[in-house]
Amino acid sequence: MTNSSPFSTLSLRRRTHVPYETLLDQLPYAAVIYDTREKRIRFANAQVTELTALTRAELCKLGIVSLFPTLDPGLLKMKADNSEQPLEVSIATNIRRNGPLLDVHLTPTYLDPDGKWVLLGIEPTNVVESRNKELFRKAQIWDALQTLALAPQTQDFSSVLSKALEAGSSLTGANLLVIYEVNSTDYQLERTAVWGPAELLPEQIPPADLGVLQSIHVWVTGKRTLSTLDRAARASNFSYLASVPLAQENAFTGLLVIAGDQLIHNDQTLVVVQFLAAMINSFHQNHVLATNLKTELQEQGRELVIGSALIEMTHDAVVVIAPDLTIQELNPSAESILGYATREVRGQPYSNILVGADNLIPPFVTIQEGTSVHNLGNVKLYRRDGKTFLGHVRTVPIVVDEKIINLLVLIQDLSQEEHYRLRNQQLEQRALLGEVSAIFAHEVRNPINNITTGLQLMSYTLSEDDPNHEVVSRLQTDCDKLAEMMKSVLNFIRPVEYKMEPVNLGAAIGRLLERWHPHLARVNIQHQIQVEPGTPQIEGDVRALEQVWNNLINNAIQAMGQDGGMLSVKIRPVVTPNNNPRVEVSISDTGVGIPEEIRDHIFEPFFTTHRNGTGLGLAITKQIVNAHKGSINLTSIPGGTVFQVQLPIPNKTLKA
């Protein structure tokens, strides 16, 4: 009941001719209008006459205390906040026959600002209590349904089942709720979730009871027990036990059991238990689906990480093409090989990037139509800078639901392999040439010696003024040159055993420059040597290294020519980018420099720019340096060239 009333705006004087009793009769509860000043009842509805067995006229003659013997009239005075709480009083049910008093709730509602007129609502206490119980029960059911609805949001599935059983307790009023699940190993039912005193029902149910429990089963006090659960319920003094099977995909998977100490009054409880079992089945299915989905997502995530790592780390170029044949993604290798960044080419037609491969277009179209084409073979492609390279191209269509969503183009850069192939071919040819040259040199030396001997005899037999002396002299010079060339060829070809010993490069090159001094002076070349203090010794073959320095000094003298210049030698310790300590010898000249187009060939055998050169000097020099595990490089500009030879420092020297 509320404190508002439809009469609050009406005048209560008799002359209004308003049928107040008729209006009061519209109320769903017994009610009277009480005059607080005259302290008597003015109007009453039909429900009051039924409650008290008095007519309206008789009621209007009664004082308030006569009708409500336990009421203190002072409690009906209007409060300052114009609100009143229900009063627990007794009403005389049959005044004429001294009938019993009935406990009622009296609710006052003031109809005017002065508090003269009060509408008194009258409800039997048992009716109010019954209604409150019903409201409480509804609120309890609502809370239980909310708990049931929110249960799946719990992270732990065991907590989901616990909340479901907690809600089931509120819905059914049961003292104990248990979930049993089938063990796939021995087909026993094992207790997996419980609400209430778990020890009152067994942890396991034997397979022999499944025949009874695979359908809805109810046991009540006085009924014969048919299963282990029934016997446990009777031993625990429960009034009833009900079980509903749990199933997934029409297969029996478990059991929902409830037990209580109050008998089931109707089938409503079983309906609620079946509803709860259906919800638990739904929770189980959702949990299985969520678990499978999580596992699948984790597996897919793992595969994506592995795939991404492979794409990122592979040396092959990977180009991802969208269904509309535009570039979607390039991996780092593709960016490096093709020369494009992904952000620059994303959304562009693939033909703008994979340039120079006309035979790629038909396969792409075919793949887009659904035919899988994998190996396209070796294709000549262009880099961004216009340079061509040979690439081995494969295509991998990415198919989802029988539809191609992407096309992966895998390009293996074969330029390095082609370089190695050509290099190996060149080495094989050189090896063959070396064998032929060695045989040729051996075979040619004897005839040259014979020719030289013959020329010497001819020279002895000619008179001093014979003009053929000049011809014989030129022939001997040519034979000497040819013999020297054969000697160089054999030195370059035959394996050499080096005698390794400590070498002080500063002292060795210094002595060598002293021997070169007369020749340098004749060609107007000044020289200097600079040895950085603390330069350690290296291990090497003194004679072989002397040949290296002789070749480089002779090369510098030839580069400076008749105009002369400056020959500089600098010796110092250095550390390579790989943190390897070495001694570097730099030999520089002030000659015309080496043209860029021939710098890559000057260490090749038989390559020379000098008319009388053999083309083996720098080739032998590099061979000796490599045999000493060193390196040789050059830097050249118009006006000078620097040869840099780096030789390793022995470990024992470093430790010392």
Image: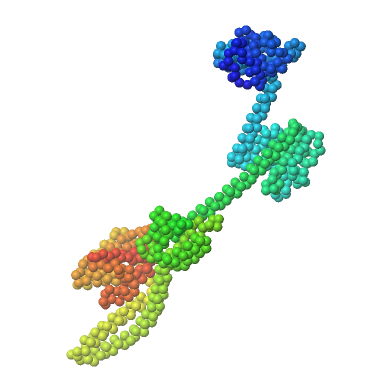
Looking at the rendering, in which quadrant would you find the C terminus? bottom left
Instruction: Tell me where residue 278 sits by quadrant.
Output: top right
Is any atom of residue 256 visible in this view? yes
* 483 to the left or right of 327: left
Q: Is residue 357 left or right of residue 402?
A: left
Q: Where residue 27 appears, x then y in whole percent?
A: 65, 20
Q: Residue at x 55, y 13 (%)?
A: 113
Residue ranking furthest to the left: 465
Nearest the camera: 69 or 500?
69
Measuring from the top left, give residue 558's x and y in whole percent: 24, 72
Question: Is residue 473 found left or right of 314 in the rendered image?
Answer: left
User: Which residue of the protein is positioned furthest toward the top in this rendering?
Assistant: 38
Say which residue appears at 30% left-offset and 68% top-offset.
597
Q: How many marks?
A: 0
Res. 197 image quadrant: top right
Q: Position of residue 326 (x, y in %)?
A: 44, 57
Residue 455 location, x and y as percent? 27, 88
Please name the residue shown 35% across and 65% down the image: 631
Q: Nearer the viewer, residue 454 or 75?
A: 75
Q: Is residue 605 above or below residue 237?
A: below
Q: Which one is in front, 537 or 119?
A: 119
Q: Is residue 493 above or below residue 647?
A: below
Q: Is residue 578 visible?
A: no
Q: Quadrant of the N terminus?
A: top right
Q: How are the colours assigned in the image?
A: rainbow
* Along the viewing direction, whichever of 569 and 116 lies nearer the viewer: 116
The residue at the point 42 percent across, 65 percent down is: 357
